[in-house]
Amino acid sequence: MFNIRYKQLNRHIGNAEKTFVIAEIGQNHQGDINLAKKLIKTALECGADCVKFQKSCLSEKFSKLALNRNYESPNSFGKTYGEHKAFLEFSQAQYRELQKYSDELGMFFTASAMDIKSLDFLANINVPFIKIGSGDANNLPLIERASQKDIPLVISTGMQDFATVKNIYRLVSRYHKKFALLHCISAYPTPYEDINLNVINLYKREFSDITIGYSGHELGIHITTAAVALGSKIIERHLTLDKTQKGSDHKCSLDPQEFHQLVNNIRTLESAMGQPIKIMQISELPCYQKLGKTLVYVKSLPKGHKLDFEELNVKVAEPKGIDGSKLSEVIGQMLVLDVEEDESVLSKHLLKIK
Ligand SMILES: CC(=O)N[C@H](C=O)[C@@H](O)[C@H](O)[C@H](O)COP(=O)(O)O
Ligand SMILES: C=C(OP(=O)(O)O)C(=O)O
C-alpha cells in the first residue's frame, strides 16, 4: 500500500505485492566495515530485498548513566555499555560508504533511527524508508518527527502492549498511511510459546488500511514462513556470517544458507497461496481421469424408467460418465434407453423431466 523508491530502485509494498524481505545486519558486522560489506553482498545473494543497519547517536539515545553502566557479558565489546556501543557504531561517513556500496549492488539500504539526530541523518541521505525498532516504539516524539518527513516508516512493536500499538497507529495516521507495523517479540532467541503469531491477525483486523509484517528473533525459519502465510508483507530477520561470533544477536540470526532457504520458502509459499477460488485444477486431471468417481446404475433398468436414489452408485468407472457430485440432479430423470448393471451413467441416457 505504499511505494519505496531509491534512485533506480522501486518497490510496491502491500497486500497484493510480493513479501518485502529485510536482512537486518544490525550490529552483526562486529564494528568492521569490510564485514558489513560482506554481509550486504551476502544478503543480496540470499535474495533479500533490503539491508538494514542500526543508527544511533549515543549521547542522544542513552543517558550518561546508561552509557557508563558496566557491560560484563560474553557479548560485550567494551567495559561500559557506552564503550560497547561505540565500538559497534559506524560513523556518518561509514554509513555513506555502505550506502554507496549497496547502491552499486542495486540493493535497498536503510537503518533504524534510534534517536532524532540519527533520524535526521538518515532522512538526509535519502534512505527509501526509515525503520523504527521496537526500542523506539514507545518513543512518540521520535515517531511523530519521523511521520512529519515524507518517508515511509516500518515500525516494530516488540516490548509494547496493544494500547501503545494503537497509539502509534493513530499518531502516524495523522500524517500519512505510508507505514507498516511489524509484530515482534524482543527476546533473543524468542521462545516459540511467546511469539503469538495470531497478533498478526489482530493487527490485520484492527489496522486494515496499512501493511502488516513480522520481525522475528526465534530460532529457525519455519515460524517466519508461517508469518507470511498469515499475511505478513514485510519480513525482517537478522543475518550473520557466523552464529558462533561474539555479539548478542548472532545466535538467533540466520546464516546465509538459512536466509536463502527462508526467501525461497517465502517465494514458494506466495505462489502456493493463490486465490480463494475452489475449482478443479488442470494439474488434477490425470488423477481425476484415473480415480475420479462417476455415477453408475446399481442394476439393469428399462427405457422410460425414472431414476431413484437407490438405483445409482458412485464408482471409478469406465467410460467416465456423469460426475458423482451430480447425483441429486440425476435423480428423477428418465432413461431414454435400456441400461445395464454397473454401466456408467452418461448424459445421452437421460431425459430431464420438467
Ligand atoms: C531492541 C533492539 O534494539 N533490538 C535490536 C534489534 O533486534 C538488537 O539488534 C539489539 O541492538 C541488540 O540485541 C543489542 O545487543 P547488545 O546490548 O549486546 O548491544
Ligand atoms: C530493534 C530493531 O528491530 P526489531 O524491533 O524489529 O527487532 C531495529 O530495527 O533496530
Image (cartoon, rainbow, N blue to C red):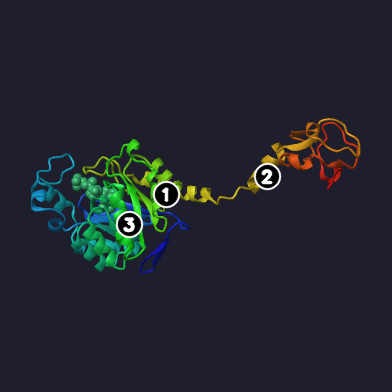
Dot 3: few (<14), some (14–19), or many (≥20) neighbours within 10 Å?
A: some
Instruction: Report x, y in % for residue 191.
Output: 31, 37
Q: Is residue 41 above or below residue 335?
A: below
Question: 221 left or right of 94?
Answer: right
Distance between mark 1 and mark 3 Cα atoms:
28 Å
State the residue in front, 63 or 330. Answer: 330
Dot 1: few (<14), some (14–19), or many (≥20) neighbours within 10 Å?
A: many
Q: Amino acid at mark 1?
A: Val
Question: Disc 1 vs disc 3: Cβ atoms closer than 8 Å?
Answer: no
On residue 274, the disc is none
Q: Quadrant of the N terminus?
A: bottom left
Q: Amino acid at mark 2?
A: Leu
Q: Residue at x 30, y 64 (%)?
A: 127
Place residue 289 in its image quadrant.
top right
Disc count in the image?
A: 3
Q: Residue at x 38, y 50 (%)?
A: 203
Q: Is residue 145 above or below residue 236?
A: below
Question: Disc 2 vs disc 3: Cβ atoms closer than 8 Å?
Answer: no
Of labels 1 and 3, the one closer to you: 3
> Could you tell me if residue 57 is visible in this image?
yes
On residue 285, the disc is 2
On residue 263, the disc is 1
On residue 169, the disc is 3
Question: 50 left or right of 71?
Answer: right
Question: Disc 1 vs disc 2: Cβ atoms closer than 8 Å?
Answer: no
Q: Is residue 298 above or below residue 23?
A: above
